[in-house]
């Protein structure tokens, strides 16, 4: 039986790819990995990517969500507030984009998710460190 290794990408349905790139570009700093016509765009996250696909055919997601890892969660919160985004009242940071996608944001140093040093260096994120709590989670699983 095959083992799960990770997530290569997540695909989000949006109403308009160009509008989504502009909106997400107000929230996150990113590089465009590529496009497939006017209906698909791929936002680079090092060894992973976020696919934006149009048109949206699904209803709004209220409970179903996915999590993005960032280097500065409070910078995301400020950008969301500046953009007038709908921030969901939760213990962490969650927002709903203009197309109804529910997104949770977590900070790299506070969770066990890890990128290799080579990937971080290639992304220009050298020196990102983990908190003691995140390192303890990794040690508990033998992943340190």
Image: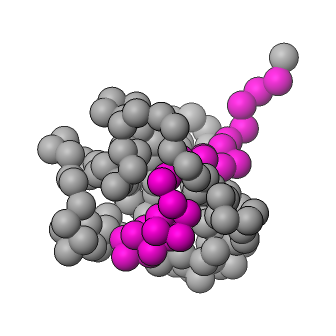
> Is residue 14 shown to the viewer in this render?
yes
Q: Would residue 58 be found to the left or right of residue 132 on screen? A: right
Give yes or no for residue 110 being in the magenta stretch. Answer: no
- Residue at position x 40%, y 69% in the image: 23
Is residue 115 visible in this depiction of the protein? Answer: no
Q: Locate residue 84 relative to residue 3 in the image: left or right.
A: left
Q: How was the colour assigned to the protein in this rendering? A: one colour
| Residue 71, quarter of picture | bottom left
Task: Name the residue rendered at 69%, 78% in the picture.
Answer: 122
Where 22 falls versus 13 (above or below)?
Answer: below
Vertical order, 109 against 72 (above or below): above
Total number of numbered discs in the rendering:
0
Residue 81 location, x and y as percent?
18, 68
Point out the stretch of residues depicted in magenta: 2-27
Q: Position of residue 114 (x, y in %)?
A: 58, 55
Q: Image quadrant of residue 86? A: bottom left
Q: In this orientation, which residue lies closer to the viewer: 97 or 57?
A: 57
- Residue furthest toward the top? 1
| Residue 49 image-quadrant placement | bottom right
Q: Quick one: 35 or 39, which is closer to the camera?
A: 39
x and y percentages locating residue 39 in the rendered image: 65, 58
Location of residue 85 with respect to 71 vertically, above or below? above
**Extreme-right residue of the structure:** 1
The residue nearer to you, when weighing 51 against 18, is 18
x 37%, y 76%: residue: 26
Residue visible at 38% across and 59% down in the picture: 107
Instruction: Tell which of 24 and 110 is nearer to you.
Output: 24
Pick the quarter of the image with the N terminus. Answer: top right
């Amino acid at each position: 039986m095959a083992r799960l290794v990770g997530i290569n990408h997540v695909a989000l349905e949006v109403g308009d790819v160009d509008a989504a790139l502009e909106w997400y570009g107000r929230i996150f700093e990113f590089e465009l990995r590529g496009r497939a016509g006017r209906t698909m765009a791929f936002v680079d996250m090092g060894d992973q990517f976020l696919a934006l696909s149009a048109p949206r055919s699904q209803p709004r997601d209220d409970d179903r969500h996915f999590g993005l890892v960032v280097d500065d969660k409070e910078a995301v919160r400020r950008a969301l507030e500046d953009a007038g985004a709908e921030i969901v009242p939760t213990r962490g940071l969650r927002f709903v984009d203009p197309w109804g996608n529910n997104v949770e944001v977590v900070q790299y140093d506070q969770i066990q998710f890890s990128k290799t040093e080579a990937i971080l260096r290639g992304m220009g994120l050298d020196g990102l460190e983990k908190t003691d709590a995140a390192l303890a989670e990794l040690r508990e699983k033998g992943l340190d």
